[in-house]
Amino acid sequence: MLLETTTDRERFAAWLSAALGHAVTVTEVTAPSSSGGWSNETVLVDLAGNSPSRVVVRVKPDGPAMFRDYDVTREYRVLKGLAQRQAPPVPPALAVDPTGAVLGRPMLVTGYVAGRVPSDDRPSFVEAGWLFEAPPVDQHRFAQSLLRAIHAVHAADWRALNLAPLARDLDRPLDGEIAWYRALHDWGAGADRHAVIERGFAAVQRDRPPESAPCLLWGDARPANVIAHGFDVAALLDWELAGLGPAELDIAWLLEMNRMRTVGAGVPPLPGFPTDDAVVAVYQDLAGRALAHFGWYRLFAALKVAVLMERHLRTAIARGRLAQDHRLLRDNVALRRLDELMTA
């Protein structure tokens, strides 16, 4: 675990003290109750000194990782920008070390936000835990709060917040998103390409809709990236995939990720969660416009899930957690979903 040695704790405390402008010392380091996302290592650090009393430290994993580049400044920039607004709620960004000078790996430090996080591990939030056990009316309240928070992300003035550097291609944001996932797949898979993913890239390129005005994107919109107070959103987490592009990208991703946790896992959806059509209708009411070309965005979301699933599996293989040439590389829920959308 991070910050196990006295030397590392003292070095971290000195660096964070300089960033905060007052002295702090590390009193305890613990792992969060959830393993969190697939792409970073996270610890909770308790501090003595002036506030804050607890911070969250996220670093690039040691060894094989999901992404070729770990751009902690991307998340830091988004959190700093959104902190200027009251909505959506995000953790305060406290310090960033993009080069790994402090602990040897790039690092982002944010304030700790108390609350409950829907589980992404099995059993997931649709199978067990506080959201699963809640009455349907409270499940519905959470889902509606999440949709309002996502719309608040999209409503943020990214130009005024100086977030233009998030764009992969500011003039052609869809092309930029497709190219980024294409490059990630090419790097991660090498010569070992899966035919379904290759067909997916061909399909999204062939049928790509016209470019539209970009907005700020969360990039990983899903319940497991939410801290809740009661059943209301208290903070949106995990901004490493944030970017600029059509709002449809976030909504399609939300629906595909929810589908993977339910239909893909053979588990019924939470009774209080809205159907896909209801999610679209609620968001359209919030945005005051229709979601355009949404079938294509669902396909692209499924392709992204398949690419990231493959990266997750190959990272697990490289770390010795799965056998070489594991069957899941050839057949998994993400590949089956992508194939289903292309053959429907």
Image: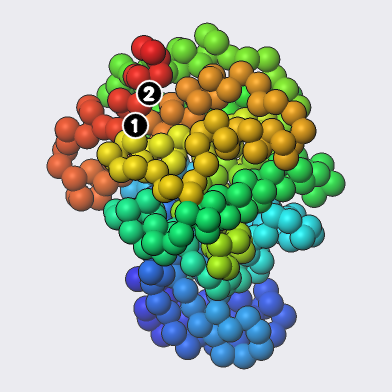
Mark 2, Cα crowd under 10 Å, few <14 / some 14-19 / many 20+, is many
Amino acid at dot 1 = Ala
Looking at the image, what colour scheme do you see?
A: rainbow
Q: In this view, does 276 lie to the left or right of 318?
A: right
Q: Is residue 261 left or right of residue 180?
A: left
Q: What is the number of the mark on residue 334?
A: 1
- Front-most of residues 246 and 71: 246
Q: Position of residue 266 (x, y in %)?
A: 27, 39
> Quarter of the image holding residue 157?
top right
How far apart are labels 1 and 2 at the CA level? Answer: 6 Å
- In percent of the image, x 40 and y 19: which residue is there? 341
- In percent of the image, x 69 and y 55: which residue is there? 88
Q: Position of residue 320 (x, y in %)?
A: 19, 49
- In percent of the image, x 26 and y 32: which residue is there? 332
Placement of 49 over or under 286, stated as above or below: below
Q: Where is residue 117 in the image (x, y as percent from the top left)?
A: 47, 62
* Res. 29 visible in picture: yes
* Res. 40 visible in picture: no
- Residue placed farthest to the top in the image? 206
The quadrant of the picture occupied by the C terminus is top left
> Quarter of the image holding residue 291?
top right
Q: What element carries label 1?
A: helix
- In percent of the image, x 61 and y 49: which residue is there? 144
The quadrant of the picture occupied by the N terminus is bottom left
Asked if disc 1 and disc 2 are in contact, CB closer than 8 Å, the reply is yes
Placement of 209 over or under 320, stated as above or below: above
Amino acid at dot 2 = Leu
Q: What is the number of the mark on residue 235?
A: none
Q: Where is residue 54 in the image (x, y as percent from the top left)?
A: 55, 79
* Disc 2 target residue: 338
